[in-house]
């Protein structure tokens, strides 16, 4: 007998919506029912593609469709409002990262979720990428010896004309490249080493051609385990790069997330054969479904995501004050 399918609605019909609907379609136990976007024509285009209902008002969608799961793929400043409304209507949540604009908003979401007894998965996709998962296995195997440092570098044109303006307005996005991409790096390092951030020092710059958010940043941080790590990111014109180097006493890994994985055992890097896996979005939906069925936490719960936001807030405090911040 085929298991009962849970209805899923997606709030936000932007570029990432298609990946959500494709993953929902491939996950037994879920079925898409509706999409909402304030741009009705954009919602309708998605609805036509996937054979679902389209709404311009997310509250009307939730009241009318009564979805079991709501996916929040909206600008960051809308996460708190929409997550709480969905939770109050008994909907489990797939909430894109960052969880919210600040720790206080995260706490509000967590309180609403606790009252409603719902499951939440925060979309920190780094946990679900094949190269990252394989890198974590190598680290845990001890093949690299004791890990002594991690260096993470990411560069891309953050101010390209195709980027929506809200990303570049701090009150809507929570920050610039460090809020959007830096949280990926903080998360990746914490998750790879199974240790949270303990202290940070940071410096940022503001030379973007639009908006009021930082365009680059460099972070020195230490994990609770004592491991040092650096994050360097630039959104100004230059060569695109996205690499994480994990350095141990017996070897090194070079992680090009979503692309490739390389290992050095004392000499030149050699590419590692990474076994194929489901897409990160499919793995997220399977994780959420398991948590709903077992009434347990997902592997990326709100408490963890709140910690990422706490680390980001410490980064910005350090950049503003010039003083190292402890978490």
Image (cartoon, rainbow, N blue to C red):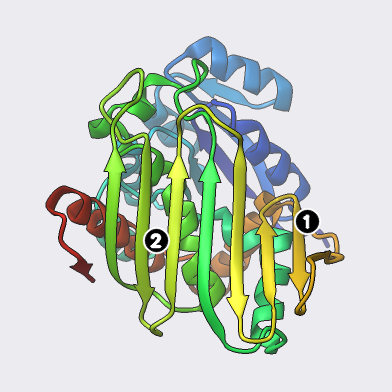
Q: Residue at x 53, y 40 (%)?
A: 155
* Side of 124 where 85 appears, left or right: left
Q: Is 188 placed above or below 14 here?
A: below
Q: Residue 42 location, x and y as percent? A: 56, 15
* Side of 57 where 149 appears, left or right: right
User: Tag 2, which secondary structure?
Assistant: helix
* Side of 205 where 144 appears, left or right: right
Quadrant in the picture for residue 324: bottom left
Q: Is 233 placed above or below 13 here?
A: below
Q: Residue 119 location, x and y as percent? A: 46, 62
- Neighbours of disc 2 within 10 Å: few (<14), some (14-19), many (20+): many
Nearest the camera: 161 or 122?
Answer: 161
Nearest the camera: 153 or 259?
Answer: 153
Q: Earlier in the sequence, mark 2 or mark 1?
A: 1
Q: Residue 176 location, x and y as percent? A: 35, 37
Q: Is residue 289 visible?
A: no
- Taking the view exactly as shown, the residue that stands out farthest to the top is 41
- Neighbours of disc 1 within 10 Å: few (<14), some (14-19), many (20+): few
Task: Residue under label 1, please give it.
Answer: 278
């Amino acid at each position: 007998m085929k298991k009962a399918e849970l209805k899923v609605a997606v709030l936000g019909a932007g570029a990432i919506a298609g990946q959500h609907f494709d993953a929902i379609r491939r996950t037994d136990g879920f079925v898409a029912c509706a999409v909402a976007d304030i741009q009705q024509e954009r919602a309708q285009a998605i609805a036509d593609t996937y054979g679902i209902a389209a709404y311009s008002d997310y509250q009307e969608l939730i009241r009318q469709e009564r979805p079991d799961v709501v996916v929040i793929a909206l600008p960051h400043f809308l996460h708190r409002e929409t997550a709480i409304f969905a939770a109050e209507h008994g909907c489990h949540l797939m909430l894109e990262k960052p969880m919210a604009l600040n720790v206080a908003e995260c706490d509000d979401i967590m309180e609403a979720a606790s009252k409603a007894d719902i499951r939440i998965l925060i979309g920190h996709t780094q946990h679900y990428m094949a190269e990252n998962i394989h890198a974590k296995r190598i680290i845990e195997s001890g093949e690299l010896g004791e890990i002594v440092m991690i260096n993470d570098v990411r560069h891309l044109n953050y101010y390209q004309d195709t980027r929506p303006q809200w990303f570049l307005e701090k009150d809507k996005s929570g920050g610039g490249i460090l809020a959007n991409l830096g949280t990926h790096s903080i998360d990746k390092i914490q998750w790879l080493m199974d240790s949270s951030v303990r202290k940070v020092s940071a410096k940022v710059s503001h030379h973007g051609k639009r908006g009021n958010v930082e365009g680059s940043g460099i972070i020195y941080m230490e994990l609770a385990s004592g491991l040092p790590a650096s994050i360097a990111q630039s959104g100004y014109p230059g060569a695109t790069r996205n690499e994480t180097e994990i350095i141990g006493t017996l070897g090194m890994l070079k992680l090009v997330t979503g692309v490739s994985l390389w290992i050095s055992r004392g000499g030149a890097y050699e590419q590692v054969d990474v076994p194929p896996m489901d897409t990160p979005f499919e793995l997220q939906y399977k994780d959420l479904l398991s948590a709903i069925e077992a009434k347990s936490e997902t592997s990326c719960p709100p408490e963890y995501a709140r910690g990422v936001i706490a680390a980001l807030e410490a980064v910005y405090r350090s950049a503003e004050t010039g003083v190292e911040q402890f978490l």
